[in-house]
Image: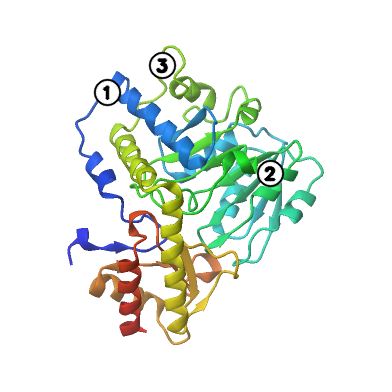
Amino acid sequence: MALSDRILMGPGPCNPYPDAVAALGRPMLGHLDPEFLGILDETNDRLREVWKTSNRLTFPVSATGSAGMEICLVNVIEPGDAVVIGVNGVFGGRMVEVAERCGADVTRVDFEWGQPVDPEQLLDAHPNPKLIGVVHAETSTGVRSEIGELGANKGDALLLVDCVTSLGGIPVEIDEWGVDLAYSGTQKCLGVAPGLAPVTVSERARQFIVARPRSWYLDLNLISKYVDGEGARAYHHTAPISMIFSLHAGLGAVLDEGLENAWERHETCGRRLREGLTDLGFELFAVEGHRLPELTTVTVPDGVDDAVVRSRLLSDYGIEIGGGLGAYAGKVWRIGCMGHTARLRNVELLLAALTQLV
């Protein structure tokens, strides 16, 4: 089967939107060309629409989603700062590691994998943290955590949210929820290839940006002069022109469909996938009420060889799904319905293939 025919139903990347693929082949422009700068500004405007925010400092970091996490932390955390982070999977743990590397005094609040983060426990974990960090949609478990309660009760703390798997797939309301810093990735529900990390920073959070962050490349003091669009553009780094063209097009596809319609499409696919997997005898891993429509997790049944089935799905049917991480490697499957991949026809193909293999 041709590589172009593969259906990417793992935890990411997904199959990108056709317009996003086509945009990669646009004629090259210089990174300070007025036409490119206009497209960058439009891309940032489109990101504000998808993030549901008015934050001026909203832009795609020139690196993948993990760089989005780093840019949010290195710019506001100094050695000794008190930080509270909820951990209910791999990516909350990564947030802890980055905060510790910034010298933060981290209070780690752990929750069972497959369960959401409890906002009350995070809020009670420290009397006066500088920052509270949480993953909205945990990619390792397929679990959604509530963010609004944290934003409403954070006090003086900054609220940092990982939206890598949620942005474009389920409601994300940055301003309404009181989120100060958030980051995502292009390769999941935004339907673009990996390579950029959309970030949004509130005006309040900008007041906490340290004078000399521990990273030059990720220094928001420097980057903001390039992306704010006020006065002359400062040259910070050579932007990845083609990837920004592609993100511009991918965001256009989402907004042309209608953001709420995109959320509903993801929900419809996720619901059908859960129903079909349950009918086949699979046990859903994430707790009911907090299951992500864009990333469904199931326990691998006894007697089923995880590696063999996933390999045959790919070789015989051209369908890729993801395995578990950490302690759940070989025990859990992570099945994505994200971006352009979130189509009922793909769900039905997968279910039919699993009927033959399991």
Quadrant where the N terminus is found in the figure? bottom left
Labels 3 & 2 near each other (Cβ < 8 A): no
Secondary structure, mark 1, is loop
Mark 2 sits on what residue? 151
Residue 179 location in percent, x, y? 62, 40
Q: Position of residue 117 (x, y in %)?
A: 66, 58
Tell me the distance, in whole angstroms, between the alpha carbons under discs 3 and 2. Answer: 33 Å
Q: Quick check: 341 left or right of 332?
A: left
Q: If the image is split into quadrants, where does the C terminus sit? A: bottom left
Q: Residues within 10 Å of mark 3 (few under 14, many from 20)?
A: some
Going by the numbered disc 1, the residue's amino acid type is: Gly
Write the residue at 50% across / 54% down: 170
Q: Nearer the viewer, residue 202 or 208?
A: 202
Q: How many marks?
A: 3
Which residue does the numbered mark 3 point to in the structure image? 233
Tell me which amino acid carries mark 3.
Arg
Q: Residue furthest top?
A: 231
* Precedes in sequence: disc 3 or disc 2: 2
User: Dot 2, how many residues are within 10 Å of its Cα: few (below 14), some (14-19), or many (20+)?
Assistant: many
Name the residue that disc number 1 marks.
30
Tell me if 340 is positioned left or right of 133 in this view.
left
The residue lying toward the viewer, choosing from 343 and 305, is 343
Is residue 294 visible from the viewing direction of this image? no
Residue at 62% x, 50% y is 134
Tell me residue 180's x, y (percent).
62, 37
Q: Amino acid at mark 2?
A: Gly
Please identify, in this view, whether the residue under mark 3 or under mark 2 is nearer the observer. Answer: 2
